[in-house]
Amino acid sequence: MPAEMVLVLSRVEIAEKVRTLAHRISKDYEGKELCIIGILNGVFIFLADLVREITIPVQIDFVRLASYGSDTTSSGKIRFTKTIELDITDRNVLVVDDIVDAGLTIAYFLEHLKQLNPKSVKVCAFIDKTERRKVHVPIDYAGCVVEHGFLVGYGLDYDEKYRTLPDIYRLKARGEGTHYDHSL
Ligand code: IMP
Ligand code: MG
């Protein structure tokens, strides 16, 4: 582990939380049709694990919403760089993201989804990071709640680095012995 990181969740703990989420989702949507929409890029590892633990048939699609530059703070600007291709009219939709921080990305996407007339919409996020929340977003399924810190690994990146680490780490803040300035 690089010196500038602190372990937050091990791969064993992650797998346990993913299984719990998948069981809840499978139970809640039993006998129903479900479209899962993942928000790229960070979600790809979590989503791959989650859908393999879900025991009901699901359809999967992705969107890509760009909201961050190459830094750790949101630019506040959100735009689609890839939109949905599945027809979700009158379908049950589960939006899946890796981490909800300010909430702006999910809020923007939920607003967009409404116009497509789905039957229902719920949100699943592996990490619900609460301290910087700017808009209220309903998170129906959260893997875990983390108050603050910039996390990497398990799909989460810092400037496109560390996505492939199997465990989740927090980058140490300035003053904790690193050069990263990610003032939260
Ligand atoms: P927000 O909820 O609009 O602030 O945006 C959430 C998105 O910002 C996530 O899907 C991530 O792509 C990114 N993000 C927020 N917090 C972190 C973090 O701690 N590590 C890595 N990416 C993060
Ligand atoms: Mg993301």
Image (cartoon, rainbow, N blue to C red):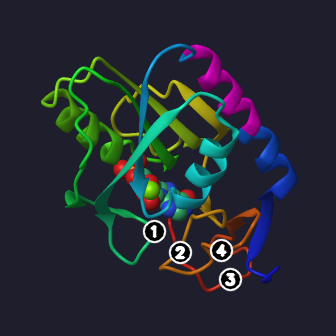
Tell us which disc is closer to us: 3 or 1: 1
Q: Which mark is residue 164?
A: 4
The x, y position of residue 152, in whole percent, is: 63, 67
Crowding at mark 3 (Cα within 10 Å: few <14, some 14-19, many 20+): few
Q: How many marks?
A: 4
Foreground pick, 159 / 27 = 27
Query: Reading the chain from its start, which is encountered first: label 4 or label 2?
Result: 2
Query: Reading the chain from its start, which is encountered first: label 1 or label 4?
Result: 1
Tell us which disc is closer to us: 4 or 2: 4
**Badge 1 is on which residue?**
72
Q: CA distance from mark 3 to mark 4?
A: 21 Å
Q: Is mark 3 within 8 Å of ligand 1?
A: no
Tell us which disc is closer to us: 3 or 2: 2
Amino acid bearing label 1: Thr
The x, y position of residue 31, in whole percent, is: 53, 13
Q: Is mark 1 within 8 Å of ligand 1?
A: yes
Query: Reading the chain from its start, which is encountered first: label 3 or label 4?
Result: 4
Up the image or down, 70 lies above or below 92; here it is below
Up the image or down, 117 lies above or below 100; here it is above
Amino acid bearing label 3: Thr
Q: Which mark is residue 37?
A: none
Q: Are marks 1 and 2 in contact (CB under 8 Å)?
A: yes
Tell us which disc is closer to us: 1 or 2: 2
Q: Residue at x 65, y 74 (%)?
A: 164
Q: Are marks 3 and 4 in contact (CB under 8 Å)?
A: no
Tell me the SS state at disc 4: loop
Foreground pick, 105 / 180 = 105
Q: Is residue 182 left or right of residue 5?
A: left
**Badge 2 is on which residue?**
158
